[in-house]
Image (tube, grey):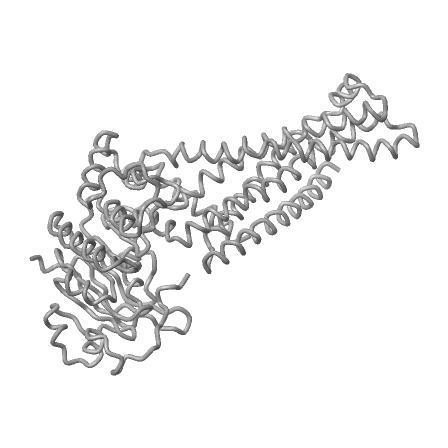
Amino acid sequence: MGSIFWLLLNTLEEVGDNARRGRLPFRLSMLFAQTDRTGVGSVPLVLMVSFFLGLTMALLTGYQLEKFGTERLVPTLITIAFTRELGPLLTGIVLAARIGAAYTAELGTMQVGEEVEAIEAMGIGPLRFLVAPRLVAISFLMPCLSVVSCLAALVGSSLISWATLNLVPAAYFDAVMTSLVISDIVIGLFKAMFFGLLIGLIACYQGLTVTGGAEGVGRATTNSVVIAITTVIGFDTLFNIMVTKITG
Amino acid sequence: MSDTPLVHLENVVLRYGDKTVLDGIDLKVMPKDRLVIVGQSGGGKSTMLRLILGILRPTAGRVRYRHVEVQRLRRSKLNLLRSRIGMVYQYSALISSMTVRENLALPVEELSRKSKSEMEALIEENLALVGMTGTEDKMPSELSGGMRKRVSLARALMMRPELILFDEPSAGLDPVISSVIDELIIGLTQKTGATSVIVTHEMDSAFRIASRMTMLYQGKIIEDGTPDKFRNSTNPVVHQFVTGTTEGPIMETPLNADSPK
């Protein structure tokens, strides 16, 4: 954790140095390229995973709640679960695997090929040039993808509820609207942004510290995914304990 | 010629753990020098280039660029200094996801305020200097090793550096292309008036390029002087290295100093 904190501080310092010289903190074209692959490129996977998870959750909980005649609680359960918890968590896991791995492999290959050192040797800060646009892209797109995840899960769960519990979509989404709480949405979006920053930092750090050629890149990529997923789940648990303590 | 060295390594010691790579190096690079550093593979030659660039910090001693102590510079000042130095890497180190044009434009776009037309003219001029006109839109993967090295040289010239560092410029190239690169180094440094430091262990190349040579052995400088002084050296290590014979004091104990990463 200390290393990624230093990476963040050094990146901010390089970005700040450039801004003080009256220049853009980093290349906008780099930011747009990263935004496109991180955000737009991840939409299909996030949609699919969330749709099927929402569907399965509604199926299983509906089946159980039906025994007590409380199956109408399914929309509420899915809404709270996804806006506050599963949307950011699921998106985090998907992005750690899809984008975190890509960041590490790219930067690792550049590190092995002396490209990162060449950028440094030219006097262009490699952190502001390579790391900053990736961090900004993943941090700001995680909340957007988390919203996509919630919507997909609600659609999936409403369809299965319609098919198995005779809960028509109009009634389902009425229940969803009454269950939505602003604080849950805000907490969910904040968590998503924080998870995005964590995944980006871990992936970039692993990539920039690669040693040992192609094998090293492979090892770092695996480490990046494992560490990012574990850290996201760990911080999510910590976050939930804190929020529960604070809000009672 | 000015008496103030452009670069001065003062009693530089560099250790990785208990391994001493450079052991009290004292070396002055004078303006307009074409200094070739020779020595065994893994003997710490490339490490010296990284010390000059401030990428590595010495364990003891000082690296001065003109009157400035490199390792004391803040990051922003260090980057400013680096922009006045060009570096050509052993394996070119072109950004693989960028075209030749984008690679050349990179330092100019990031570090100067030149207009697009000025930059295009500079790219054209530098590619012509290294004989690579017409390759602007090619990716580095589409170029041969020699062509990549020439593009890397063109990139190093983009900021009109006063010092150019070459790390094994002829490594992995056939003798003809190797000679072409050597001629380019001589021609370009004369034309631009830049000082150059070239690291190599290929003696043909070294004698062709050098205006001055220095030899690194077991972390110390054991010979420094003109190419003629090297040819006629009575030092048995230098003599064995120059002639390339297997009989002599040089043992097969590379320090692997160039791969600290």
Residue pictured at 23% horizontal, 64% vertical: B9
Compared to residue B83, the image places residue A76 above or below, namely above
Compared to residue B252, the image places residue A126 above or below, namely above
Q: Position of residue A205 (x, y in %)?
A: 49, 50
Give the total number of marks visible in the rendering.
0
Name of the residue lying farthest toward the left = B1
Compared to residue B18, the image places residue A11 above or below, namely above
Q: Position of residue B87 (x, y in %)?
A: 26, 52
Image quadrant holding the C terminus of chain A, namely top right
Residue pictured at 14% horizontal, 62% vertical: B208
Given residues B244 and B79, the one toward you in this image is: B244
Q: Position of residue B150 (x, y in %)?
A: 24, 48
Name the quadrant containing residue B167.
bottom left
Name the quadrant containing residue B139.
top left
Given residues B209 and A174, the one toward you in this image is: B209
Given residues B30 and A46, the one toward you in this image is: A46
Q: Is residue A2 left or right of residue B10?
A: right
Q: Is residue A58 left or right of residue A191?
A: right
Given residues A74 and B136, the one toward you in this image is: B136
Q: Is residue A63 left or right of residue B68?
A: right
Residue pictured at 86% horizontal, 28% vertical: A71
Residue pictured at 31% horizontal, 67% vertical: B44
